[in-house]
């Protein structure tokens, strides 16, 4: 009998170890497949990332599936997760709106973050500033001059009042730059993008994975990235700090949480399982190809991130005198 090549043996061993670790209950007694609640519609960034996770966890020997519970800006699904049994059998994927909503004063059926147990920060992606190609500006400096020359003529689209792009736009355009620009809210990111591509609205402050394909196709013009470093996909596009606007690093992130009261050993189990999936080269390559930076931090690091984000968004709301709709 022929022996297997050495690299193939190592690969098979790695798969066996991963499958064993994920399939092992280790305190999580789930008679049914583990549910990952996504508080947004199918096809949303949260949904795409959750499905990658559920698929890979299941392929490795576990039983995981995604349940979409969209509505109220993500609050319906998140509230459902908060009421779930703290047995490790229900997880929820949350994004930056998890901290934006309490910052703006939304009435919630749960406490942020106290109704949940942090597991891990999965991915992050920077917000960007882009415009319809008909807008005669190729840099942030030119856009500012254009808007200042014609107050209230230009507008920006957002996924909705109180969304993180709305608050980030208010902070950038009005609080920082003092521009008279009109906010046009939509019911979600896709219609905001569609409107700007069509030229009905002129400016977008949205996450890179959403706008990147349209920039490549020439349907949007990218002006700047709201991050500390340039986006590898668009190395010629400056950060806002390079464009002369410091301290405006905002972005999208996705994370996994469990209901409050979940035992520590189950939290560690879920963190370990997810960490093993997030370390897979094909998963990291797929996420990077979508424009996300894989993170997979510890529960404590994610808890600290939540507090930092909550403080940041509260300051933006306070300084902008933004009230709940």
Image (cartoon, rainbow, N blue to C red):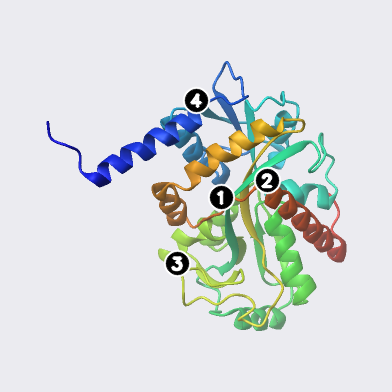
Q: Earlier in the sequence, mark 2 or mark 4?
A: 4
Quadrant of the rendered image containing residue 266:
top right
Residue picked out by circle 1: 190
Quadrant of the rendered image containing residue 129:
bottom right
- Mark 3 or mark 2, which is nearer to you? 2
Q: Earlier in the sequence, mark 4 or mark 3?
A: 4
User: In this picture, is 179 found above or below 91?
Assistant: below
Secondary structure type for disc 2: helix
From the viewer's perspective, tell me whether residue 43 is left or right of residue 11.
right
Q: Give how far apart the Cα atoms at labels 3 and 2 are.
A: 30 Å
Tag on residue 299? Answer: 2
Residue picked out by circle 3: 233
Going 62% across and 24% down the picture, which residue do you hit?
A: 28
- Mark 4 or mark 1, which is nearer to you? 4
Q: Give how far apart the Cα atoms at labels 1 and 3 are.
A: 21 Å
- Mark 2 or mark 4, which is nearer to you? 2
User: In this picture, is 288 found above or below 6?
Assistant: below
Residue picked out by circle 4: 63
């Amino acid at each position: 009998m022929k022996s297997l090549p050495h690299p193939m043996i190592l690969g098979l061993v790695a798969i066996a170890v991963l499958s064993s670790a994920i399939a092992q209950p280790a305190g999580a007694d789930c008679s049914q497949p583990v549910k990952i609640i996504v508080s947004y519609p199918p096809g949303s960034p949260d949904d795409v990332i959750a499905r990658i996770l559920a698929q890979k966890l299941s392929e490795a020997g576990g039983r995981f599936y995604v349940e979409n519970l969209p509505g109220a800006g993500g609050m319906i699904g998140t509230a459902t997760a908060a009421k779930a049994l703290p047995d490790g059998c229900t997880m929820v994927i949350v994004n930056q709106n998890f901290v934006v909503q309490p910052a703006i004063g939304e009435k919630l059926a749960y406490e942020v973050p106290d109704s949940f147990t942090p597991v891990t920060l999965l991915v992050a992606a920077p917000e960007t500033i882009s415009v319809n190609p008909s807008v005669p500006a190729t840099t942030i400096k030119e856009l500012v001059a254009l808007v200042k020359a014609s107050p209230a003529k230009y507008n920006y689209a957002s996924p909705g009042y109180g969304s993180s792009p709305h608050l980030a736009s208010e902070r950038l355009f009005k609080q920082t730059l003092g521009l008279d620009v009109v906010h046009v809210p939509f019911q979600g990111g896709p219609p905001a993008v569609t409107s700007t591509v069509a030229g009905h609205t002129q400016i977008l402050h949205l996450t890179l994975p959403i706008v990147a394909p349209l920039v490549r196709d020439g349907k949007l013009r990218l002006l700047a990235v709201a991050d500390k470093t340039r986006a590898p996909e668009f190395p010629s596009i400056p950060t806002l700090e390079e464009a002369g606007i410091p301290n405006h690093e905002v972005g999208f992130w996705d994370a996994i949480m469990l209901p409050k009261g979940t035992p520590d050993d189950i939290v560690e189990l879920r963190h370990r399982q997810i960490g093993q999936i997030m370390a897979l080269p094909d998963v990291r390559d797929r996420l990077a190809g979508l424009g996300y930076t894989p993170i997979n931090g510890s529960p404590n690091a994610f808890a600290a991130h939540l507090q930092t984000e909550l403080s940041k968004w509260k300051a933006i709301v306070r300084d902008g005198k933004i009230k709940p709709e």
